[in-house]
Amino acid sequence: MPSPKAKNPSRSGGSPVLGSSNGRYDFRQGSDPTTARLRCPESPTRRRALSSLLAIDLWLSKQLGVCACEDSSWGSVRPLMKLIEVSGHGIPWLAGTAYCLYKSDSAAGQEVMLNLFMGLLFDLVLVTIVKAVVRRRRPAHNRMDMFATFSVDRYSFPSGHATRAAMCGRFLLAHLVLAAPLRVLILLWVGLVGLSRVLLGRHNVTDVVFGFWMGYCQYNVVEMLWLSPQTLVILWNFF
């Protein structure tokens, strides 16, 4: 006669499997018999895929960091890359926009410059928050000799230069009347700013790619929260 315990595996301390017949998910008992844990057997595969993508990102970023120092393979181009780096820095953009806002003698020009200034502030705050939350270290081959850095700049994700370049590029193309060569020049500048971040070893490839996407979306927020001329008059009188 079979033992009564064989009819009830839960009494023998086993781990009964509950769930669908294809075994995608199962519930296993822990130390407390009244609790159950949902385990997804696909998670190790996803972790391996993410680890592989991260390894490719780190390897590719290291291979492209050809201007990380003077003795790198493209070390002679490093001064030019650093000049492009300064052109995408937040301080020159904020100072230049504030100056244009002060000197503008038309309501339309003041409106455009004010919204660009607010967009730059929004970009600065958002990038700072994301960097503080993610806390991804900069590439090991990077040399910390950047212009006007802050404590949060020791983190790499996302690239603030890339977010700023993407947002400002869309803004200028949408709100300034420019000839075709100047529009091409702006697009070229945006691409060079992102490329310089990887060539200088400042960021990994994914930092720049995500930064471009983030800056592209930031411009949409700026358009949604656009300050009208009436709001400009109110702010101008207040200050």
Image: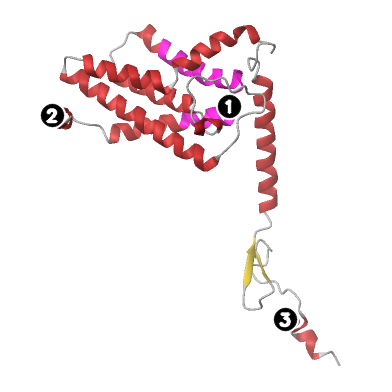
Whichever of callouts 2 and 1 sits on the residue coming sooner in the sequence is: 1
Bounds of the magenta segment:
185-213
Where is mark 1, residue-wise?
203
- Kind of residue at badge 2: Asn
- Residue in the image at 54% along x and 34% along y: 157
- Kind of residue at badge 3: Ser
Residue 44: image location, x then y, percent? 70, 51
Q: Secondary structure under badge 1? A: loop
Which callout, 2 or 1, points to the residue nearer the camera? Answer: 2
Where is mark 3, residue-wise?
10
Q: Secondary structure under badge 2? A: helix
Report if residue 200 lies within the magenta region: yes
Where is mark 2, residue-wise?
237
Residue 126: image location, x then y, percent? 42, 36
Whichever of callouts 2 and 3 sits on the residue coming sooner in the sequence is: 3
- Residue in the image at 44% along x and 15% along y: 87
